[in-house]
């Protein structure tokens, strides 16, 4: 039994853009990427439907990215704090 292939968002965008450019036929893209024509059509349609969201002010993607950055910064500061505490405890226990 074959497992389903999973494609990254970057790969899907790349294929959709190539389909939109129409420099190659859908059949050629199918052979190139080993994907069905229906899949390429679906990705192309989804890409075009959501293209305007790139230009929306305060879009979800930008907000999510900044939320992730904030969470990462909190985690890095916590790691630093724990390292300082760990070093302190090591020195205190070795005396």
Image: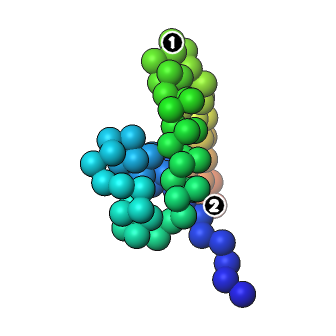
Of the pair 89 and 7, the residue shown nearer to us: 7
Tell me: 13 left or right of 43: left
Q: Residue at x 50, y 32 (%)?
A: 48
Crowding near the residue tagged with mark 1, few <14, some 14–19, many ≥20 C-alpha atoms within 10 Å: few
Of the pair 12 and 27, the residue shown nearer to us: 27
Q: Residue at x 50, y 43 (%)?
A: 44
Give the spatial CA distance, label 2 vs label 1.
54 Å
Assign a secondary structure to mark 2. helix
Q: Residue at x 51, y 12 (%)?
A: 57
- Quadrant into which the N terminus falls: bottom right
What percent of the width, then of the height, locates residue 17? 38, 43
Relative to 23, say whether 60 is above or below.
above
Image quarter of residue 75: top right
Give the number of callouts.
2
- Quadrant into which the C terminus falls: bottom right
Crowding near the residue tagged with mark 2, few <14, some 14–19, many ≥20 C-alpha atoms within 10 Å: few
What's the coloring here? rainbow
Residue 71 seen from this side:
yes
Of the pair 88 and 9, the residue shown nearer to us: 9
Instruction: Check the image and name the residue furthest to the top.
Output: 57
Q: Residue at x 50, y 21 (%)?
A: 52
Residue 80 seen from this side:
no
Which of the two labelled residues, at mark 2 and mark 1, occupies the earlier sequence position?
A: 1
**Disc 2 marks which residue?**
93
What percent of the width, then of the height, locates residue 14? 39, 49
Assign a secondary structure to mark 1. loop
**Disc 1 marks which residue?**
57
What percent of the width, then of the height, locates residue 74? 59, 34
């Amino acid at each position: 039994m074959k497992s389903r292939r999973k494609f990254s968002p970057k790969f899907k965008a790349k294929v959709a853009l190539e389909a939109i450019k129409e420099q190659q036929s859908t059949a050629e893209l199918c052979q190139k990427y080993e994907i069905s024509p229906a899949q390429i059509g679906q990705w192309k349609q989804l890409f075009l439907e959501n293209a305007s969201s790139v230009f929306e002010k305060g879009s979800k993607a930008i907000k999510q990215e900044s939320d992730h950055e904030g969470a990462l910064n909190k985690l890095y500061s916590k790691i630093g704090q724990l390292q300082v505490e760990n070093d302190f405890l090591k020195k205190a226990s070795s005396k």
